[in-house]
Amino acid sequence: MLYTLKNEHLTVTVNDMGAELWSIVHRGAEYLWQGDSTYWSGHAYNLFPICGRLTDGKYTWQGKTYEIGCHGFARKTQYTMIEQTENSLSFRLTDDEKTRAIYPFAFALTLTYTLEEKTVRTTFHVENKGDEPLPFAVGGHPGFHVPLGGEGSFDDWRLEFACAKNDLRQLIFSDTCYLTRNPSVPFPHLVDGKIIPLRHTLFNNDAFFLENPCRTVSLRSDKSDRAVTVSFPDMPYLGIWHAPKTEAPYVCIEPWVGMADYDGESGDFATKRDMIKLGAGESYTNAYTITVA
C-alpha cells in the first residue's frame, strides 16, 4: 500500500513493502527513479541487516550457517505502518519465524520519513529485543532520474561534494563485486577535489564506493536549476551506481554504514567488518536526507 506526504514544495510517496521511498515530485517533475526493470526495478531500497553481498550469500553465527541475499531481507519485506502525522510516516518491521530462519535475532526496525520544506529525512531506528548482541548494518539506496526533469543529457550532469577533498579514496572491489583487501586508492575521476562528471562508462565495472567522503553530495547540471542533495553525516561509505554497461538514465547515491564481504571469504557475523554490535536492550539511530531544488 502507498502512503503520501505533501507540503507546498513536495509530494512524497512511500510503499509499505520494504518501507521504500516510492516517489518525490517537485515542480511538476518526478525526481526519484521509478523502477523500470529494463535497468533496475527498485526506487530507494532500505538496506538491513547487511549492505552489499555476502560470499555465496551465506554467513555464520555461533557455528551455524545462514543465508541472506544481497542487501538483506528488509527491502523485500512487508512493514506495518505504525504512525502517520501531517509531516511524517513511520513503518516497523519486527522479527518473526521467517526472519529468524535466516537472521536468528530479536529486533525491531523502524523507518521514519519526515518532510521538512524541500527535504525528506529517512531515519533508521534499530532496537535489540533479545538478550545477546545484535549485529547489523544499515544503508540507503535511492535512485534519481538523470537528467532531472528531462533537462540536458546524462553527460551534462555531475556529482558535486560540498567540500573539496583531494585525497578522496575509493575502495577496491573484485570483478564479482566483493571487497578486496587491497588498500583504498585515490579516486581517479575527481575534478577540482569535489566534482565527479557523470559518464555511463563510470559504471562499466558496476558500482564504485568511496571511503569517508565529504558527507554531502549534490546531483547538478549547468543546464538546469534542478538539483538533488544527499546528506549522510553518520555514514562512512558512499556508493555510486547504475546498471553496468548500459546507458541507464538514473544514478543511485547510496550512503552505507556497512560493506560487502571480502572476496572469497565467508563471513562470521561476530567478526565481519563494519557491523554494528548493539547490546541487549539498546537502540541505534541513523539518518540521511534528500533535499531537492
Image (cartoon, grey):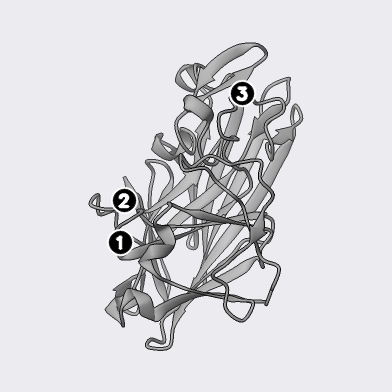
Task: Quarter of the image for the C terminus: give it.
Answer: bottom left
Residue 192 percent across, percent down from the top left = 61, 81
Give residue 40's mark: 2
Question: Residue at point 41% right, 87% down?
Answer: 225
Label 3, on which residue?
106
Label 1, on which residue?
248
Asked which secondary structure carries label 1, the reply is loop
Chain-order first, disc 1 or disc 2: 2
Asked which secondary structure carries label 2, the reply is loop
Chain-order first, disc 2 or disc 3: 2
- What is the three-letter code of the residue carrying label 3? Ala
- What is the three-letter code of the residue carrying label 1? Ala
> Quick check: marks 3 and 1 in contact, CB under 8 Å?
no
Question: Residue at point 73% right, 21% down?
Answer: 132
Q: Is residue 207 left or right of residue 60?
A: left
Question: Residue at point 65% right, 26% down?
Answer: 269
Between 1 and 121, the residue placed more toward the observer is 121
- Within-10-Å neighbours for mark 3: few <14, some 14–19, many 20+: some
